[in-house]
Amino acid sequence: MKAVILYDSKSSGGFTEALIDALGLSLAEEGVYVEKAKCRANADYRFVQEFDLVILGAPVYYFVVASQLLGSLIHGNLRQHLKRKKIALFLTCGSSEAMAAVLYLPQLKMHLIRNKILVEKIFASSALTDGAIDDFTEDLLYEYQKTIKTRTSSSQWTDEALDRLHSAPTFIQGKFKIMAEEYAEEWGYKEITTEMLDEARAKLEGR
Ligand SMILES: Cc1cc2nc3c(=O)[nH]c(=O)nc-3n(C[C@H](O)[C@H](O)[C@H](O)COP(=O)(O)O)c2cc1C
């Protein structure tokens, strides 16, 4: 598996960079090929296509997630190249986990509503516990493996979902089937149901 850590920080050799190096090491020990790249809002993010997993991480400064990562999502082409990518998120900050989950993580997640987010984590710079990074790696690899395992059974359709497929005009049934199966694979559904089809449609329509 190939993973890239896309990060931002204003501090060279600060807490975030140290954490990323430790995370890279922890992933590499588990056999993951890891690269890291510092975000620039105007960078060309086509290269993320090569990676199976994209880990996004940054500190919070003055209540806002670091600007080059946010800027890459809002103004750059990062979001476009994250399509269908499995993602993990982390923030480093001085606040408590609970506060960061409410105030800061949504600043990233609101731009990633179409992505499968495997794991999200807050690392408090003042209270990094032993084993926190290895736990993050373990959770991440567990969730990643789950998405791979469900892939083999992603083409199971319930009778109701098949009825819905067959009620579509014949010329779009093939495309409909592929899109539904890709959605199921991406979101880890073992079975394609009418509820999943409704959800996929709502997401496609941006609802
Ligand atoms: C100028 C500055 C502003 C900060 N503002 C916040 C903040 O609003 N909320 C918060 O939880 N942490 C805040 N922090 C804490 C940082 O997010 C935290 O220490 C982070 O790990 C710093 O990462 P770095 O060493 O890579 O810069 C701030 C730190 C600095 C230096």
Image (cartoon, rainbow, N blue to C red):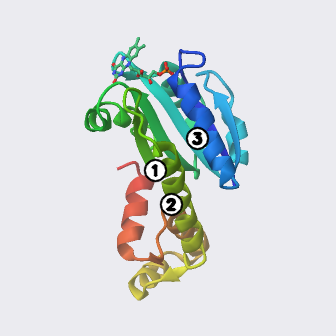
Disc 2 from disc 1: Cα separation: 7 Å
Q: CA distance from mark 3 to mark 2?
A: 16 Å
Residue bearing mark 1 = 119
Q: Nearer the viewer, residue 200 or 31?
A: 31
Whether tag 3 and tag 1 are in contact, CB under 8 A, the answer is: no
Ligand 1: image quarter: top left
Q: Residue at x 51, y 46 (%)?
A: 88
Q: Nearer the viewer, residue 198 or 61?
A: 61
* Residue beneath disc 3: 23
Dividing the picture into quadrants, the one containing residue 173 is bottom right
**Where is mark 2, residue-wise?**
143
In the image, residue 162 sits, relative to residue 70, either above or below, namely below
- What x and y, as percent, mark residue 160? 39, 84
Compare marks 2 and 1 and give the one earlier in the sequence.
1
- Whether residue 177 is visible to the viewer of this picture, yes or no, is no
Give the residue displayed 61% in from the left and 46% down from the top: 26
Residue for point 37% across, 36% down: 105
Q: How would you rate the neighbour count of disc 3 (Cα within 10 Å): few for under 14, some for 14-19, many for 20 or more?
A: some
